[in-house]
Amino acid sequence: MPSYTAPTKDMQFVLHDVLKVSASDIPGYADLDRDFTAAILEEAGKISSEVLHPLNTVGDVEGCRLENGVVYPPTGFKDAFEKMKEGGWPGLDMPEEFGGQALPYLISTAVGEMFSASNQAFTMYQGLTHGAASAILAHGSDAQKQTYLPKMVSCEWTGTMNLTEPHCGTDLGMMRTKAEPQADGSYKISGQKIFISAGDHNMADNIIHLVLAKIVGGPDGIKGVSLFIVPKVLVNEDGSLGERNAVSVGKLEEKMGIHGNATCVMNYDGATGYLLGEEHKGMRAMFTMMNEARLGVGMQGLAQAEAAYQNAVIYAKDRLQGRAVTGAENPEGPADPIIVHPDIRRSLMDQKSFTEGARAFAFWGATLIDQAHRSGDKEADGLISLLTPVLKGFLTDQGYDMTVQAQQVYGGHGYIEEWGMSQYTRDARIAMIYEGANGVQALDLVGRKLAQDGGKPVMAFFELVKTFCKENAGEDEAYVRDFIEPLKKASKDLQAAGMYFMQNGMKTPNNALAGSYDFMHMFGHVCLGLMWARMGKAALAALAEGTSDPDFYKAKLLTGRYYMARRLPATALHLSRIESGADTVMGLTADLF
């Protein structure tokens, strides 16, 4: 069975050596000293390793079952959920007035990585609840907040998001679920939703569904979509639970992965619902959930890659096969461990350089969210809006690829269920699809985010990279050669791609859209390049100051140099593809496929 150890040391490095969180002027960050964050991360890591991870294989093998209209999660999930609630983990960053601990989103992000890495299917139950609660917090009335948030923050009640229907996914303007106004101000919701994660289970007393529907008589298309709170069990005026609502589970989906999470077909048969936010402004309210969810899904890509990598390293050190080409390194044994072979090292270095760079990228993104929400910083809000599709799309694409590489290290054993590596690949695969498939993320990035606010966020990003390179041009010669120069070159590739879109996108839109996926990956590589340049600088500083663990910082430098030399040059390939235009992509007529 695979193992998992929370990477708390690396998290502390990113938080304090790189981001220097306790010195930040973001409200609440002054409290985030090393001892405080260490206490939280160590406890979360302990729960991840001792409580959640042992249930990961159980959830994968057993899955969920639907009996007499009730969904039962895998063995052990309910007890583990109680432990999560007792520890207050679901409300880590939620307001104190509703029972949360009001910690920065950054801390919730770090803890969320560990929980997802140890058991993604389980963690989704509370993750979806957090997203639904955030939407109610942002758009709900005072009465709605008082009714639902205390129970949702504690996860006594859980939450879901209901968007997709059998005939429409991304194009939500085609939805058929309808909402009929009632005399008492409520609505009757009728329709069917599919792919609803955590749609039903017996781990909470109530489930608060957030459902997109069209009010009868409203505008056509996406402009007529509204968002509704539809409880599984109706809530009385005094807060007690009342009658069962007219919402039911049609079936459980059989899936490639995340078997421990109940993915449901939900039927609404005149169920009582309550408008959340304004009429016909449902997408605005839903995006509060979706943007948070997309960041969380990006973290899932990183988390599965981290867990898979840890096990690949263990296997590579233990598995004996062949001899090192430079001479036996295990002369007393029948063969050398496979970690001596260059191609295994290449694979492990791909994984290690990705996971550590992605962690820094995700944590930096979380600081931008805190800066935007806690300080009202519009520039930070614009920047994280730009980076959200990159965080979601790039980290999940690359995260999946890294689980495949980890599986490959095992050879044939990676394909055998007994060794557990296939679960990481299967569980990681969904992250590329849900909360907006990655192709849609790329279209959003190029079609909407680049031009957002007159292009200010993307120009701010380029200026940020340029300033960093300029400020560090006088550093150690090897650092400049190995980190700054590759970052400058990659950033120029990204700017050249943006210029190509500006020059060709208006007159030939397909030229921009055909290159959108490459642009998303190019952007991701530049972001990780920036993170590695920052981490390399921090590692050099720690070594210069003197440290009790020089090997950690030396490894950090070597890993960063690997990324800059072997992974970051992919920007040149992506640029070449983008500048080739759309002719080769769109050349075939549909009947020739």
Image (cartoon, rainbow, N blue to C red):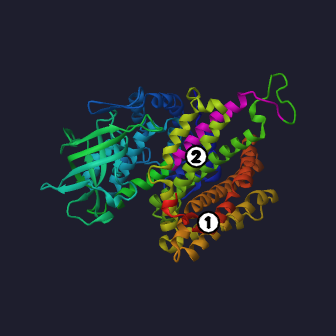
Picture mark count:
2
Please give left or right for residue 188 compared with residue 146 in the image. left
| Residue that badge 2 annotates | 399
Cα–Cα span, label 2 and label 1: 23 Å
Mark 1 element type: helix
Q: Quadrant of residue 181?
A: bottom left
Label 2 environment density (alpha carbons within 10 Å; few <14, some 14–19, many ≥20)? many
Residue situated in front as seen by the camera: 236 or 392: 392
- Magenta span of residues: 298-324
Furthest-right residue in this view: 327
Q: Is residue 136 magenta?
A: no
Dominant secondary structure, magenta: helix
**Which three-letter amino acid code belongs to the residue tagged 2?**
Gly
Mark 2 element type: helix
Residue situated in front as seen by the camera: 314 or 464: 314
Check the picture and name the quadrant holding the N terminus: top right
Residue in the image at 32% along x and 37% along y: 251
Residue in the image at 50% along x and 66% along y: 449
Q: Quadrant of residue 511?
A: bottom right
The label on residue 153 is none
Residue 26 in view in this figure: no
| Residue that badge 1 annotates | 578
**Which three-letter amino acid code belongs to the residue tagged 1?**
Ile
Residue in the image at 39% along x and 45% along y: 128
